[in-house]
Amino acid sequence: MLIHPQIDPVAVSLGPISIHWYGLTYLLAFGLFLGLARLRLKHPSFQAAVSPGQPWQTRDVEDILFVGVLGVVLGGRVGYCLFYKPAYYLSHPLEILAVWQGGMSFHGGLIGVLLAMVWFARSRQRPWLHVMDFIAPCVPTGLAAGRLGNFINGELWGRVASPDLPWGMVFRGAGDLARHPSQLYQLFLEGLLLFALLWLYARKPRPVGAVSGVFLIGYGVFRFVAEFFREPDAHLGLLSLGLSMGQWLCVPMVLAGMTMWWWSGRAAKS
């Protein structure tokens, strides 16, 4: 079995200023989004001659990133409080603002991004799903960067693994038993693999809403699978049918994605 490397969470210290690895992975995520989104601008679906509403510009990418980050932070925090610890935060509402204590939910962040993109679409007079189709293939690499940060910090580790698993890893604070490095599973599944599949799918012209639907399906399925190897939240454990909260939150996500993909195909034929 392997031992999780004891990596200092602070990457660089400059006097009183400390730059954490987790912060650097966020910067990496933002940089990847900007680069990929600028490539998406060259896709025929987003050229000025065929795009609905105002013509797409490089400035739109920067604005999408800005409002998207706000949606991720606010939605992720509120989602964590509502989905994972509602009773606690209803009793301690001021602690909802204490984001430095940790506690973010991807599914809450997704809802925050959806709402942020509603605002952006209206401000640019574009169909909301057209905007979502634009950003969907650019998101998974950022998710991969976030999971890399989780691994560096030695957090969100996996369930206890079989003793003969070659890559089983002992994490500090998780006992002496080897566990699945589920952060890396999620990095490859929800990050790199989802990016490759979605980017290839989006290369060809697709009906409006199809790319967004495939993102919801792909992430939901990959996250559902990865949760079988990830240690469930200690205060929740496994819920009905032996599934974790993360898995239950993925169910409506996949159903919504399948409905969106089916609807987009029907709408394109009618």
Image (cartoon, rainbow, N blue to C red):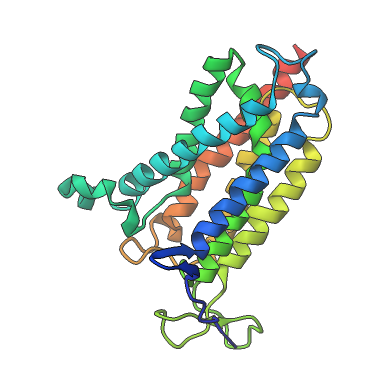
Q: Which sits in the foreground, 213 or 34?
A: 34
Most extreme residue toward the front is: 15
Q: Which sits in the foreground, 102 or 186?
A: 102
Q: In which quadrant is the C terminus drawn?
A: top right
Q: Is residue 221 among what the camera can see?
A: no
Residue 162 at what x, y percent from top left?
57, 83
Look at the picture and state if 230 lies above or below 264: below
Residue 9 at what x, y percent from top left?
47, 71
Position of 42 compared to 117: left or right?
right
Residue drawn at (48%, 29%), measured in percent from left and top?
A: 116
Q: Is residue 33 among what the camera can see?
A: yes
Q: Quadrant of residue 259?
A: top right
In the rendered picture of this protein, how many numbered marks are placed on residues?
A: 0
Residue drawn at (63%, 25%), measured in percent from left and top?
A: 131
Q: Which sits in the foreground, 51 or 158?
A: 51
Q: In which quadrant is the N terminus drawn?
A: bottom right
Position of 231 compared to 213: left or right?
left
Residue drawn at (51%, 31%), measured in percent from left and top?
A: 114
Residue drawn at (63%, 31%), measured in percent from left and top?
A: 61
Residue 126 at what x, y percent from top left?
61, 15
Q: Which sits in the foreground, 15 or 229?
A: 15
